[in-house]
């Protein structure tokens, strides 16, 4: 009878140990699911960050292109201003020369 009682006790202890193992396995499974969900969220966030960075990069390239166009237009305007300045100086010289010629006729 003593052996039967010891066997029954051992069986109860084994059952309790298995219950703890099952409980621990369930906790581990839940933690794995939480880690998996967090990983998916991080992946989605990473994709959003990547998309934002690509958009910023695209905007920066467009801005750089616009800046180059503005610089080229500014250089063209500067060249035009230099040509206008040269033309004005030439017209001033012509006006002085014409004034000198007209003064000779007045005498």
Image (cartoon, rainbow, N blue to C red):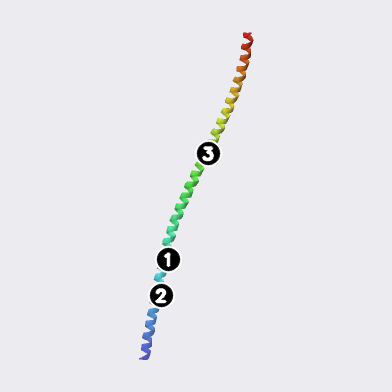
The N terminus, quarter of image: bottom left
Cβ atoms under marks 2 and 1 closer than 8 Å: no
Foreground label between 3 and 2: 3
* Image-based side of 91 in relation to 59, left or right: right
Could you say which is closer to the camera, residue 65 or residue 40?
A: 65
Residue 29 drawn at (x, y percent): 41, 68
Q: Which residue is mark 3?
A: 67
Label located before the other in sequence (2 or 1):
2
* Image-based side of 94 in relation to 29, left or right: right
Task: Note whether 96 is above or below 67 in the view shown.
Answer: above
Residue most extreme to the bottom: 1
Q: Which mark is residue 32?
A: 1
Task: Note whether 8 is above or below 84 in the view shown.
Answer: below
Residue 104 drawn at (x, y percent): 64, 10
Residue 94 drawn at (x, y percent): 61, 17
Residue at (52%, 41%) from the top-left corner?
A: 64
Label located before the other in sequence (3 or 2):
2
Q: Which residue is mark 2?
A: 21
The C terminus, quarter of image: top right
- Cα–Cα gap, marks 2 and 1: 16 Å
Crowding at mark 3 (Cα within 10 Å: few <14, some 14-19, many 20+): few
Q: Quadrant of residue 90?
A: top right
Residue at (41%, 71%) from the top-left corner?
A: 25
Label located before the other in sequence (3 or 1):
1
Could you say which is closer to the camera, residue 77 or residue 104?
A: 104
> SS of the residue at dot 1?
helix
- Cα–Cα gap, marks 3 and 2: 67 Å
Crowding at mark 1 (Cα within 10 Å: few <14, some 14-19, many 20+): few
Residue 21 drawn at (x, y percent): 41, 75
């Amino acid at each position: 009878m003593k052996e039967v009682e010891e066997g029954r006790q051992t069986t109860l202890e084994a059952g309790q140990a298995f219950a703890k193992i099952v409980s621990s396995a369930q906790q581990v499974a839940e933690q794995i699911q939480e880690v998996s969900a967090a990983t998916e969220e991080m992946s989605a966030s990473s994709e959003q960050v990547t998309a934002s960075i690509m958009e910023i990069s695209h905007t920066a390239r467009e801005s750089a292109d616009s800046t180059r166009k503005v610089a080229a237009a500014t250089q063209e305007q500067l060249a035009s201003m230099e040509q206008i300045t040269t033309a004005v100086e030439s017209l001033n010289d012509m006006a002085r020369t014409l004034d000198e010629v007209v003064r000779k006729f007045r005498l």
